[in-house]
Image (cartoon, rainbow, N blue to C red):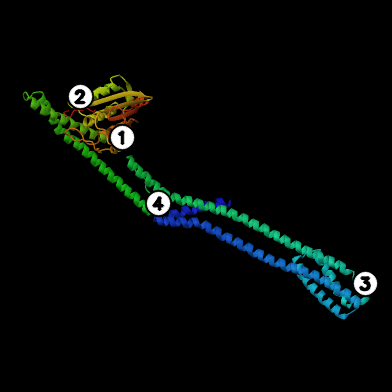
Amino acid sequence: MTLSLFLHRTVFMTSQVSRRWRPRSLLQLVLLAFLVVMLPIAVLMFQAGQALSELSNLADVSARQAVEQTRRARALSNLAIEMERSARQYAVVEQPGLMEIYAEKAQEFAELLESQQRLLPDNPNIKALREQIQTLITFPSLPVDELSLRLDEFASFAEHTDAMRTATSRQIDNRIEAISVQAAEVQRRLWLQTAALVSASLVLMLLFTWLIIRPIRQIERRILSLGSGREPASAQLIQGPAELVSLGERIDWLSVRLAELEAQKQQFLRHMSHELKTPLASVREGTGLLSDNVAGALTPRQREIVELIDASGQELQQLIEQLLDYNLLQHGQPAYYERFDVSGVIQEVLSKHQLALDKKEMRVIASQRPLEWVSDRDRTARILDNLVSNAIAYGEDGGRLEIRVYREAQALVLEVANSGEPIDDNDRSRLFEAFYQGRARRKGALKGSGIGLSVAADCALAQQGHLALVDDDALAVCFRLTLPWNGDSVIENDNRQSHSVPTLGTDARN
């Protein structure tokens, strides 16, 4: 009851204090925590000191009293012996000085017996001794013959004196035992107080730890939400010391600033795609008209230049689409799963790059065996498109391009490998970072954007898949795409409103 009542009062007082006064700084909160946690320990030390002081005083007084009472009992025994000796000698030699000594001893015995009675007030031996000493005091006034006849009374007097001394020793032993019992009780009480106060200190430590950790955890969750891009609609108010509250306000400011920058980036990408696609469409349309001989027949040299302009426009269109794809992936557009033929997607992508492959004189070996799979068709095609484009850009002129497809347990494995210069070991760790361009030089008139492989890796991750650079015994560069079976997600997609990712091969002239 005492411990629960103490803890209840502690929690109540702490809540009242926290309502009326909150630490303005982290330093104040830490100092307050140390003071409050040390308070029960200080109370324990004070109570232990008082209990030890009380026991020490009691033991000191008891020891002094025991010594005094033991000496008095011994003195009474000695006086009884001397009184008997003096009386018997007087009865023999009849010397008056012996009775004077006897009278002095008897008077001293009576005084000491009065003091001893306060120690043993109800002891029958002391009562008997008091009656006998009143009789023995009168012996000096008796004739010698009568005194000699009453000397036998000293035997009973000696017995009662020895019994009184034994009772005194027993009383002292009982007092020492009582002190031992009291010391054990004090020790037990100190252990209970120690357990209660240490528990209270632990509870207070946990309370102040929570008061310090709670705003830090709130800030941590806020930072994680900012980093993941899933910012809650209403940010939780940071409660705690002024430093952490100020830090939370700065995080709020940073969140607003990041949202503004993100909006500016989105606006820039929208404007860029529109502004770039408009003149690009005119260029592509003009080259198409020239290729169709609308403006007249072209000489072989002119047709070569028109084809070069059209290929460059197509490559520029691909770069714009990669930027838009990267932007869509960064905003976590959900995957749309459907059943499709993997070999059909491969042929579709290869037909798109056929002119570039012919120009580079690359020999293509691709799997044409039908293989149905359930995944995001558009994202899978985008991954394959980026890998083939990468092989054309960095592959060897007149080299070889292989596309392999096979099943491995419950996963689809698609490998795109090409001959040429191997990727440097220093570039492997950053190969899928956005806008990172390695040491290898891109072949062609245009420089790459450095986001093709990043888009491919993000498309794989959106389908719970994985894209990695692996070693191949036959070819220098080999990328391996692993996609899980997503057949269970087809029903879920059918129940949702249909929304598709923009088609990979949208012509800029549209």
Sequence-wise, the earlier of marks 2 and 4 is 4
> Can residue 159 be seen from the camera position used here?
yes
Residue at x 19% of width, y 37% of height: 272
Quick one: SS at disc 1?
loop
Q: Are marks 2 and 4 in contact (CB under 8 Å)?
A: no
Quick one: SS at disc 4?
loop
Q: CA distance from mark 4 to mark 3?
A: 101 Å
Q: Position of residue 64 (x, y in %)?
A: 69, 67
Which-is-in-front pick, marks 2 and 1?
2
- Dot 4 surroundings within 10 Å: few (below 14), some, or many (20 or more)? many
- Dot 3 surroundings within 10 Å: few (below 14), some, or many (20 or more)? few
Q: Amino acid at mark 3?
A: Leu
Q: Amino acid at mark 4?
A: Gly
- Residue 354 disc label: 2
Q: Position of residue 225 (x, y in %)?
A: 35, 42
Q: CA distance from mark 3 to mark 1?
A: 128 Å
- Residue 240 disc label: 4
- Residue corresponding to mark 3: 149
Residue at x 54% of width, y 59% of height: 43
Q: Amino acid at mark 2?
A: Gln
Q: Position of residue 207 (x, y in %)?
A: 47, 50
Which-is-in-front pick, marks 2 and 3?
2
Q: CA distance from mark 4 to mark 1?
A: 34 Å
> Can residue 498 be seen from the camera position used here?
no
Q: Nearer the viewer, residue 258 or 484?
A: 484
- Dot 1 surroundings within 10 Å: few (below 14), some, or many (20 or more)? few
Which-is-in-front pick, marks 4 and 1?
1
